[in-house]
Amino acid sequence: MNVTDQSFVLNFKDLDEINFRKERSLYSWLNYEAEKKYRVCIKLTDTTFLLEVMNRLFPELSCIGIVRNPFSVVSSVHKKGWFDRDNIAFSLGSETLPIKIDRDIGAIPFWLEERDYARWMNGNVWERSALYCLRATNALLKHRDAVSIVNYDWFVKQPEQCIAKLQEHFRIQATDKTDQLLKKVTYHPKSLVDDLRNVVSRSTMEELHCLAQSLSDVTLELK
């Protein structure tokens, strides 16, 4: 219900549906036996920054994390315009990321490391997108002993093999919808390294290369 949040309910549902849900008790809809058979799926990159807390609060939690070639991620984040703002110092607009306020620097995302502050404030949109990719992926890899990790680039090359292993490991069953989605998976190899060479700092470029190298041999790590 936060009107400044990108996921604000009125951006996706009309008042009739909202009122319909409000007038009915959530508890009357729940089937507790059935609920035990399902898992919550949080498709949000920021979750990687909270894995330590989540694992402590819910020790039986099963997590699947997706890693992807960082150059592709940066290009995707930039294309979505998540950090496309002229004055990132004092306002994150409707961005859903939590922030903290620094007296001298202004508003900054909570996931930045202190050494990133200057790069964030002085960097362009590409630089900020790269920092987000680096910090989010490294946060996931930091907890790889407790998270099943799928390499997105490997998945799009061998989707059926990947899904079959996930089904077996997590004791889940594919549906007709699964098959429909798998048929749409295509692999389009494309190098985006040159696209970033002149738009991010040298240190950021080095970090991206190191991350890409560390992910190059990852296929499917099941925990």
Image: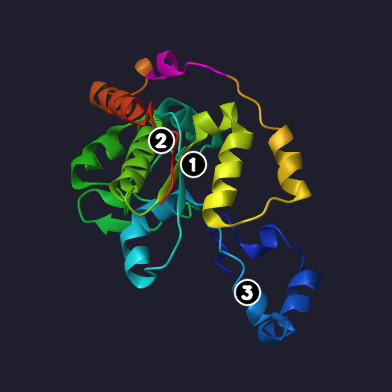
Q: Residues within 10 Å of mark 2 (few under 14, many from 20)?
A: many
Residue drawn 37% across the image and 31% down it: 215
Image mark count:
3
Label 1: which residue? 82
Q: Identify the image's colour scheme: rainbow, by chain, secondary structure or one colour.
A: rainbow
- Label 3's element? helix
Residue drawn 48% across the image and 27% down it: 72
Report x, y in % for residue 136: 37, 44
Above or below, comparing residue 175 to residue 76 in the picture? below
Residue drawn 30% across the image and 58% down it: 100
Q: What amino acid is labelled 1 in the image?
A: Trp
Q: Nearer the viewer, mark 1 or mark 3?
A: 3
Q: Are marks 1 and 3 in contact (CB under 8 Å)?
A: no
Residue 35 circle label: 3
Q: CA distance from mark 1 to mark 3?
A: 34 Å
- Name the residue furthest front: 168
- Name the residue furthest top: 194
Q: Say which of 205 and 10 sits in front.
A: 205
- Label 1's element? loop
Magenta range is 189-196
Q: CA distance from mark 2 to mark 3?
A: 37 Å
Report x, y in % for residue 27: 66, 85
Residue 51 circle label: none
Q: Earlier in the sequence, mark 1 or mark 2?
A: 1
Label 2: which residue? 129
